[in-house]
Amino acid sequence: MTIIHKSFPVGPLQCNCTVLGNSETGRGYLIDPGGDSELIMKTIQSMNIELEGIYHTHAHFDHFLASAEIKEETGAPIYLHESDQFLWDSLEMQCSYFNIEFKPTPPPDFKIEDQQELAQCNGVCLHTPGHTPGSISFHFESEKLLVAGDTLFMGSVGRTDLPGGNFNQLKTSIQEKIYTLDESTKVIAGHGPETSIENEMNNNLVIRYNS
């Protein structure tokens, strides 16, 4: 299995969007299309990938802004953990609060389950609640890659003061599900630079490895 992937910032809040695919089958996944649908589509086409699904780490507006357009163009279904449905239902209000244009977005087609496989890329969905109740991290073991959304950042973690946030849950998610992965695993955060499990275990002062 040969996996190809690209991550790049999109949208008004520069959310990191990731396209992954199996170059042998030509099929793959899109994670967090937070805007700039034309750029995302050009990337998908340049990688020669047919989407099996549009996946979301969580349902904050800056991670979904291009979802409707990508679904319309590709026909790929939208995936979200059911615990974030209440946030998905408030997407228009979220956009209004930040003065962002809202584009009507269809409801998720399928629920993401903990330990759900992403077979095209040897991946698995990890339920990592805390930033939101339904936050998901996507682990691709063979690539030593984790798409963490807003759960973990370089030297920091996602906010827990927004609706549904819970710091204790976030701490448990990071310490028990993320810090237990191979230390050399690269982490694509929801925003900002990439990091690694080892770097965060050693240097993240918000949630320590053994605190």
Image (tube, grey):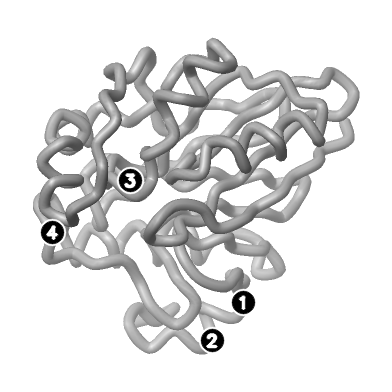
* Residue at the disc numbered 1: 198
Q: Amino acid at mark 1?
A: Glu
Label of residue 162 in the image: 4
> What's under tag 3, amino acid-wise?
Ser
Closer to us: mark 4 or mark 2? 4
Q: Please provide percent x and percent y for residue 170.
A: 28, 61
The residues bearing labels 4 and 1 have C-alpha atoms spaced at a distance of 28 Å
Mark 1 or mark 3: whose residue is earlier in sequence: 3
Which x, y percent locates residue 27?
74, 21
Q: Which mark is residue 135?
A: 3
Calculate the distance from the C-alpha at mark 4 to the C-alpha at mark 3.
Answer: 13 Å
The residue nearer to you, when weighing 174 against 191, is: 191
Q: Secondary structure at mark 1?
A: helix
* Amino acid type for the residue under numbered disc 2: Asn
- Label 4 and label 2: CA atoms lie apart by 27 Å
Q: How far from the left and from the top, in percent, is residue 62? A: 34, 50
